[in-house]
Every structure is written in structure tokens, then in C-alpha cells.
Image (cartoon, rainbow, N blue to C red):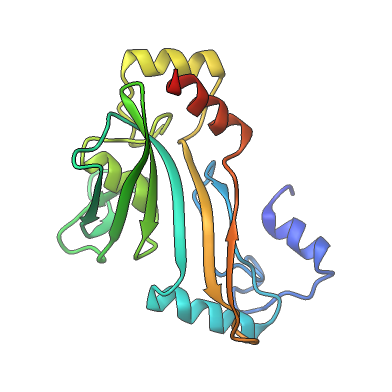
Amino acid sequence: DGTLVNALLHHCGGSLSGVGGVARPGIVHRIDKDTSGLMVAAKTDRAHEGLAKQFADHSIDRRYKAIVGGRPIPPTGSVDAPLARSPHDRKKVAIVRTGKRAVTHYRMLEPLADAALLECRLETGRTHQVRVHMASIGHALLGDPVYGRTKPAHRKVLETLNFRRQALHAARLGFIHPISKHALSFDSDMPADMQELFVHLAH
């Protein structure tokens, strides 16, 4: 109950692709628990296969907005570091030499109080990619319960706002429609909780 799959099945009257199996009908990709933003779901097997191919080719335009601790220097850059399950903690993902290649391109959109709003463009889409990559360069996402290293001043702000998740939002999703072949792009504004955090840190 209360899952995205339940909502999709209700909305689409059962007409979703079967490629993902009974547990994940129509689900082509996922975003982390407590990350807000855009996802695409497939209504037919043909659409699912076409979208899955674009995800595999890394041709999908996926951009996230993230509020991180500190300000990256330089303000734009890339992290190219392979990711796999952490050998020390199976619930975590870590940079592992033998892992799958993972590339995140970031740029600072706004400097904040000992923090920054970043746009992170994913060249690959690995589990926890933005969170691990940003933490690896010393700019962990604010509120991240797994990879965060929150400074006392930021912790106080998060507690004041009752902000209890990683400050990460899937803001843009662009792809070629698998049937019509039209280029489609969708944007989603930061939700109220992240907007509030941004405003609080912008003063």
C-alpha cells in the first residue's frame, strides 16, 4: 500500500508494461527513497524496452538539484569514480575500484551560507550516485542520513525546519519518446521543504 506502483496501477487501470515483473510493473528506473522529483514509467513493453535502452546508453538527460555543505572549488567539475556495494556495510554504496563506472557533472547554481545549491547532471545512473560522489569530494548533501557529515550550524537549521531527508531533487528528465521519437523534456521545481531550506541558507 501507498507505493508508486499502487498509484500507477490505479491511474493506468492495469495497463503498464510487464517487463519489470509483477513487483515493478512499468518501472524503468528508480530514485532513492526520500529523494523528490521526476520519474518516467512505461505503459507498454515496447515503451519500456525503448526507455531502458536509453538508460543503458546513458542518453537520458537527468539533472538533480542538491543542497550540499560547503562550496565546491572550482564551482564546476566532474566526479568519475566507480561505485559498488560497500565491502564494509552492505546497506551503503562506496567508491570501489572494481565497481561500475559512475560519472557526475556538477555546477554551482547559488552559493549559500557555508553551503551551495548545485545542479548535478548524471552521465550514469548508479544507486546513491550523487550522494556518494558529492560526499567523496567533501560536499555531502545536507540532511543525508547515510552519507552526510552535517556541521553543527547546518544541523541546527535542519532541526529548526524539521528537514529529515537528503536535500536532493530530480529536477529534469529528458528522453526520446520510444514510439513517436520526439525529444521530450520535463522539469520539476524544488518542493516546498527544499525551497524553505534554500531560502533559510540564502540569508
Image quarter (top left, top right, bottom left or bottom right) of the C terminus: top left
Q: Position of residue 153 (x, y in %)?
A: 36, 13
Q: Position of residue 142 (x, y in %)?
A: 40, 30
Residue depicted at x 50% and y 15%: 159
Instruction: Report the label total.
Output: 0
User: Vertically, is 171 above or below 145?
Assistant: below
Relative horizontal placement of residue 108, taking residue 186 as reference (left or right): left
> Image quarter for residue 11?
bottom right
User: Vertically, is 198 above or below 42?
Assistant: above
Residue depicted at x 35% and y 44%: 131
Q: Nearer the viewer, residue 65 or 3?
A: 65
User: Vertically, is 17 above or below 32?
Assistant: below
Residue depicted at x 73% and y 47%: 2
Q: Nearer the viewer, residue 72 or 50?
A: 72
Residue farthest along the left direction in this orientation: 97
Residue depicted at x 64% and y 68%: 41
Q: Nearer the viewer, residue 139 or 75?
A: 75
Q: Position of residue 138 (x, y in %)?
A: 22, 35
Relative horizontal placement of residue 158, taking residue 40 as reference (left or right): left
> Image quarter for residue 25?
bottom right
Relative horizontal placement of residue 143, taking residue 178 as reference (left or right): left
